[in-house]
Amino acid sequence: KNASRSRSPSRRGDMSTYPRENRPAIIVLARVNPDETASSFLLRGFLQSITSDSQAALALRRRFLFRVIPMVNPDGVTAGNSRTNLHGEPLSKSWGGAAYRPRTCTPIGAVKGMVEALSRERRTELV
């Protein structure tokens, strides 16, 4: 048995069990629609949980690479919009097809680019 592959690292920073380059990526998004305020609270709880010293959080961090976008549509949130960005585009409907306009839906383009780049490197899940 390989002694360097510890099953339960004792320190928070020990990630030796799953090398970073082999971990599947999990992408967590919030606030695509500006009025989804509950998602900010849920994301805060998720971040507090995943960054804690609990055994579950340590195991998740050893197993997965997390990428978090806490506010996909900050312009729409700042403007007080309900479902759209500053250009009046509903970003939740702009992930593909005819509704996607790269010039006015730049946050979606940035997220898609990140997902595509990560997907070329490793298995990726969008949550």
Image (tube, rainbow, N blue to C red):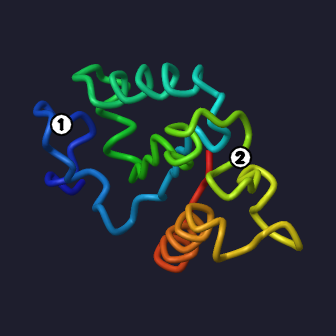
Judging by the rendered image, the residue that carries numbered circle 1 is 9
Q: Nearer the viewer, residue 22 or 36?
A: 36
Q: Earlier in the sequence, mark 2 or mark 1?
A: 1
Image quadrant where residue 45 sits: top left
Q: Is residue 63 above or below residue 80?
A: below
Q: Dot 2: few (<14), some (14–19), or many (≥20) neighbours within 10 Å?
A: many
Identify residue type, mark 2: Thr
Identify residue type, mark 1: Pro
Q: Is residue 17 above or below residue 60?
A: below
Image quadrant where residue 104 sits: bottom right
Q: Residue at x 41, y 59 (%)?
A: 23
Q: Is residue 111 left or right of residue 32?
A: left
Q: Dot 1: few (<14), some (14–19), or many (≥20) neighbours within 10 Å?
A: some
Image quadrant where residue 93 sits: bottom right
Q: Nearer the viewer, mark 2 or mark 1?
A: 2
For the residues labelled 2 and 1, the Cα–Cα distance comes to: 45 Å
Q: Is residue 70 above or below residue 26?
A: above
Give yes or no for contact between labels 2 and 1 (Cβ–Cβ under 8 Å): no
Q: Is residue 114 left or right of residue 50?
A: right
Picture coordinates of residue 113, whole percent (x, y):
54, 74
- Checking the image for residue 84, the label placed there is 2
- Judged from the image, the secondary structure of the residue bearing numbered disc 1 is loop
